[in-house]
Image: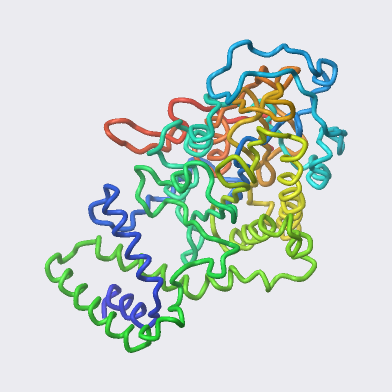
Amino acid sequence: MDSVSNRRAMLLQSGGGFATLALAAMLEGQAHGNPSGAVQSSSRIEHHVPKVKRIVQLFMTGGASPMDLFDYKPELERLHGQMLGPKDKPEGFTAPAGALMKSPYKFAQHGQSGRWVSELFPEQAKLVDQMAFLMAMTTKTNVHGPGTYMMNSGFLLPGFPCMGAWISYALGNLTDNLPTFVVLPDARGLPYNQQACFSSGFLPTVHEGVVLQANSKVSIPDLVAEPKYPFALSQADRDGQGLLRMLNQRHQSKHPGDTRFEARISGYELAAKMQLSAPEAFDLGQETAQTQTDYGLGVPSTDDFGKRCLLARRLVERGVRFVQVWSGPQGATNNWDNHGNIQTELPPMAQSVDRPIAALLKDLKARGLDSDTLVIWTTEFGRTPFAQGSLGRDHNGGSFVTWLWGAGVKPGVAYGKSDDWGYQAVENKTYCYDLHATVLHLLGIDHLKLSVRQNGIDRRLTDVHGHVIDPILA
């Protein structure tokens, strides 16, 4: 029996509904410009020895306020209440700039590095000597949708592959029984741009993010047949498999030597393997009570984000290469878009992530995963040092903060500086292009050499920009 027949036999024995999802994904590939629908994977690219094998990205939806979290600005205290902002409303601002507004939160220096951190992040503050901060991140927009696209794909418009898709395309998987790129959205909803944030763009659809609902009763739909469908029994499986076998044989007879058929079978194989591996990976009950407590499980304010951080650790531990954890949905509430009142809207968001993030970093380190895992904390832009209304802050692409932790990162350093108000980046500006180039570098990839020809253009994650931020690398 040849290899294709052996694989088909294995799939026929495994049964279940997940293979149907694999078929749907392949048909979706046909609709997105991949005529065969085949699972396409590039050769593994390695331009130099990598320091990172896997990544967890923590994305704060809405624009986390730097001057209230990580970028201490005492000048705002001195100038509080003065009308020194722009007279005309800048593009992307939702209202005219108000008076300069000091942070309502206390800041203190932490660690040997003396890094200033707000009282809103007491747990992360204990770990600043392990982090590398980008203090002068900037972007080209003050609008959520384009800003979120830019931080994920390097472009302001839809249709381009996100970083996770590029990484999947370039490096492939670390395990053959779980997806390469997993997205864990906030339980309250998807971020701005919805699933387009996790898109593979013009790359094969197989590289897009697999969205999993960590807090749903069924994290992965259709993994097994639901009891309410009494007809989905073994005999029905055998009947369906018989029909599939007939169609496969018909296709093979008409297209002898067609490698696309083999690719389809490979897709079914992954689906069958996930029937065994996914339930175990998602079973947080296997963790100790202390671990669950550390991540804040069972506590209303931290339970959702804590579960997803813990699941992220379990997934990278089992070979998922890129896991993206989102804090906050799109919209005007329950995220980091604090227009109305920075005093009432920011604390609950900060509280929901601080303890779980600290637990994630300590857990990765305790398990030795920090030796090849990178963690990234970021957002789409910052907020204004000027008040919106009386106590809110408006959108601001001029300056925001990102930090990195883990393999290949120089601990306890900071790169770049914003002005005295935190309004604009002024020293060692870094764009998403530089962040993406640095991440690819840590993965062993030269961002200048990773390209795909699309519509006559050699496209890159970093477009025609980007440099590796060497000062933050170990």
Q: Quadrant of the N terminus?
A: bottom left
Q: Quadrant of the C terminus?
A: top right
- At x 50% / y 63%, what residue is drawn? 175
Residue 99: quadrant of the picture? top right
- At x 70% / y 28%, what residue is drawn? 135
Using the image as rendered, state which of residue 330 and residue 429 is in the foreground. Answer: 330
When the figure is inspected, residue 194 is found, relative to residue 158, above or below; the finding is below
When the figure is inspected, residue 321 is found, relative to residue 384, above or below; the finding is below
- At x 17% / y 70%, what residue is drawn? 252
Q: Residue 48, percent across and down?
A: 52, 41
- What is the residue that sits farthest to the left in this orientation? 254
- At x 70% / y 59%, what residue is drawn? 303
Q: Residue 83, percent across and down?
A: 73, 12
Left or right: where 464 falls relative to 292: left
Q: Residue 168, percent across and down?
A: 46, 50
Residue 2: quadrant of the picture? bottom left
Left or right: where 106 falls relative to 252: right
Instruction: Report the coloring of the rendering.
Output: rainbow
Q: Residue 61, percent across and down?
A: 60, 41
Residue 249: quadrant of the picture? bottom left
Left or right: where 16 falls relative to 261: right
